[in-house]
Image (spheres, rainbow, N blue to C red):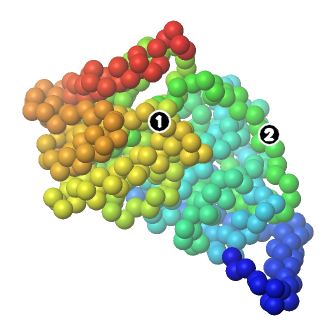
Amino acid sequence: MKQCPVPEIEDCQLRLPNITIFLLVLLAAGNALADDPLVLAPAPQMEGYVLDTNGDEAGDAKLLGYKVPDLPVGEMNETTEARVWIPFVLTEEQRASVMQPGTSATLRLFLAANNGTQGLHVDLYGSGYRSDFRVSQNDYATLRKKLVAKVFDAESKAGAGCEFDVTDFVREEAARPNAAGSGFGFLLQVHDETLLPKADGVQNVFKVGSSGRPTLEERPTLVISGKPRVANPTDPEPEDPKALRVLILGNSILLNGPMLKKGWAGNWGMAASKPEADFAHLLMKRIQENVKRPVVFKLHNIAFWERNWPTIRDDDPMVTYARDFNPDIIISCIAENTGLHDEQVDTYAAKYEAMISDIARGADGKRNADVVVRTSFWKINANTDLALSKVAARRGWPCVKCSDLCDESANMATHVTYPLGPEPVDPGVRAHPGDAGMKAIADRIWDKALSGLLSRKYPKENL
């Protein structure tokens, strides 16, 4: 800042009114919001219950808010999940309003119908866009963060409006570079979807009002105002603060939603016969058996990062949501979707190291998670494996090599006898590891890195 010598003191004093005017403008804007809040409607033609019906991962809208008065949370069949997507797009002016000190952001929802059963309830998540104001099937499992637990349950009164504080989440999304004109959304999802088939055949267990409702009070809205934040419900299942937090980064081998056009109907590691048979769940079971404290897991599909690593921003929700999970252990299993030329090895290594390091530092930037690096399951990405091994060696992270596992035909899903999805199954699906390959990956990660890390840093007698 410029220092004023004695002869120029008067000039410096003349600048003070400008600062005062600026503060008064902010104060006036805050007062204006308190008296006349901004009430934002969902992004047009994007609100609704989202289902990828053609397998292209584009997040096609099954129901759109402008077509139906109510949106179902609880419709369930073999390939859908019980959720509703309510997106918003901020203008530059609205973005500035959200960022003002003392401003609150409140999500208003209208519960149109409730056929809920005992134990069934809905949680509220926030989700950043990946691109084009859409969230694909795979993104639902990764590009989201829990905001409010139990917004609706069997005791919630139908025909009533509810308010939830979403200030911190909306500010975080609005603060991203070039955030104006882009957006974020809210996801309503049944907490335990295994209860839905037991709900006496009732579908559409909960219904919320859409933009097609006749009055503003019955429509979903985002209210930006100068009023105090509303109080959110208490989480009925709070996480144990002593829990070990394990983040597994991966791609379709880790987690992939239904892609029926390609012959895949699962919602777990592609080509495994069931969730319990994929490598992540096998590792999860071993970790839980070998540590005394509770364990919280996050499975994070970042195939989009693998494919777009040269241009993806460091503040992308795909990275920041993983960072905000505050992991104690990161198991990095990405490589299959990144092909590198020789001259890209060092550039990729730097980008990968920066991304993993950012996540390892956690939300406050002060954590130091342990990292395990796994190379590709396939042999097509030797340069990517080279880059990963360089980073691991530089940082002292264990590097588990797995590309030889695809040499064993028994590890592949090419000839598995269990069903993968509707026939014909795409060769790309069958190229994934089957149950035997998934177990081989889990065994390799456990034997070469994870078992030693847990016994060294998290021995049972010290927990």
Amino acid type, label 2: Lys
Residue at 75% x, 50% y is 165
The quadrant holding residue 195 is top right
Q: Which residue position holds label 2?
A: 157
Could you tell whether 214 is left or right of 198 in the image? right
Residue nearest the viewer, comparing 114 with 22: 22
Residue at 28% x, 40% y is 393
Residue 16 place in picture, x, y as percent:
85, 82
Q: Which residue position holds label 1?
A: 369
Residue 39 place in picture, x, y as percent:
76, 66
In the image, residue 119 sits, relative to residue 109, either above or below, namely above
Q: Earlier in the sequence, mark 1 or mark 2?
A: 2
Is any atom of residue 352 visible in this view? yes
Residue at 25% x, 56% y is 346
Q: Quadrant of the C terminus?
A: top right
Residue 161 place in picture, x, y as percent:
80, 50
Tags 1 and 2 touching, CB below 8 Å: no
> What distance separates the C-alpha of mark 1 from that of mark 2?
44 Å
Badge nearest the viewer, 1 or 2: 1
Q: Secondary structure at mark 1?
A: loop
Could you tell whether 87 is left or right of 1 in the image? left
Residue nearest the viewer, comparing 252 with 367: 367
In the image, residue 88 sits, relative to residue 301, either above or below, namely below
Residue 198 numbered tag: none
Is any atom of residue 85 visible in this view? no
Q: Secondary structure at mark 2?
A: loop
Amino acid type, label 1: Ala
